[in-house]
Amino acid sequence: NADDPAVADLGQNLAARVLYYGLDAPTLGRPAPDHVADARYCRRCGAPYAYAPAYYGHIGLYRCLSCGHARPQPDILLTVTGTEEDGRLQGRLRTPAGEGDFLSPLPGLYNAYNALAAIAAALALGLDLKACLDSLSHFRAAFGRLERIPADKREILLALIKNPVGVGQVLQMLTLAGRPLSCLILINDRIADGTDVSWLWDADFEALAGRTASIVVSGTRARDMAVRLKYAGVTGDIRVEEDLEQALETALSRTPPGATLHVLPTYTAMLEVRALLARRGYTTPFWED
């Protein structure tokens, strides 16, 4: 990833063939990185990177104003020309194998990067660019990761959250359309989730302030999540339901028919709520194509 200063240097001064991929999307960026960024400082001299722009975390078009170390020129470049209502990116893709129109298979900047990584690997193996783009158009979300499930004349969107950068990207995607959101947030602190939930305070839940119609929280750390939302400036009726089944029932009842319930779970909570949805007949009990 040319736009990631933490890994781009891995491709420098190698005898092997290197393919860099990256984005050109100035309207989707910001002048400086998020407050949660893992690589703010130049790997060569230690000075802070300047960005024009930063996309999320430490990802973006970076340059060190002290020594000149900068993002390498991408071999595979997506120039973003627009965004679908659901957050999928449209654009023009330029590669060593030619050019083509691009539509991200899933919403969010991070999923556009995932698609570019897959295209880069496929082209390196000699696959045809058109075949790559056609394949992307048929891609389906993995279970729990932006998976859409119909339920009682509503739609459930399952969006796994597990770290501050991921939360920021999910919330940026969900708030893009500007409509008030119905949310069910499920926070567990089991081994697979991470027993330390202090990361909730690093995540940008402030993005939900003034943008929610209904919030229900559940999970083993439901009350911690409710406190985090309070300090994020999220006002209104935040319902805490200790029982997962009751939490789902409450969240669905507070979501109007035809609308979407956005379910944001940690990993074990995602497995639990998906099993509950399967028992209710809304989806299959395990993922299969």
Image (cartoon, rainbow, N blue to C red):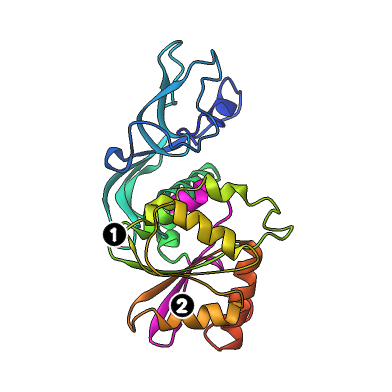
Where residue 42 sits in the image (x, y, percent)? 51, 20
**In the rendered image, the vertical position of residue 35 relative to residue 193, given as above or below:** above
- Is the residue marked by circle 2 packed among few (<14), some (14-19), or many (20+) residues within 10 Å? many
Look at label 2 and name its amino acid: Ala
Look at label 1 and name its amino acid: Glu
Q: Name the residue under label 1.
A: 84
Asked whether 84 or 223 is in front, the reply is 223
The residues colored magenta run 140-169
Residue 59 as seen in the image, left or right of residue 46: left
**In the rendered image, the vertical position of residue 224 relative to residue 15, given as above or below:** below
Q: Nearer the viewer, mark 2 or mark 1?
A: 2
Specify which label sits upstream in the sequence, 2 or 1: 1
Q: Within the image, what quadrant is residue 272 found in? A: bottom right
Where residue 100 sits in the image (x, y, percent)? 32, 49
Q: Mark 2 points at which residue?
A: 251
- Which residue of the protein is positioned furthest toward the right in this rendering? 191
Membership of 162 in magenta stretch: yes
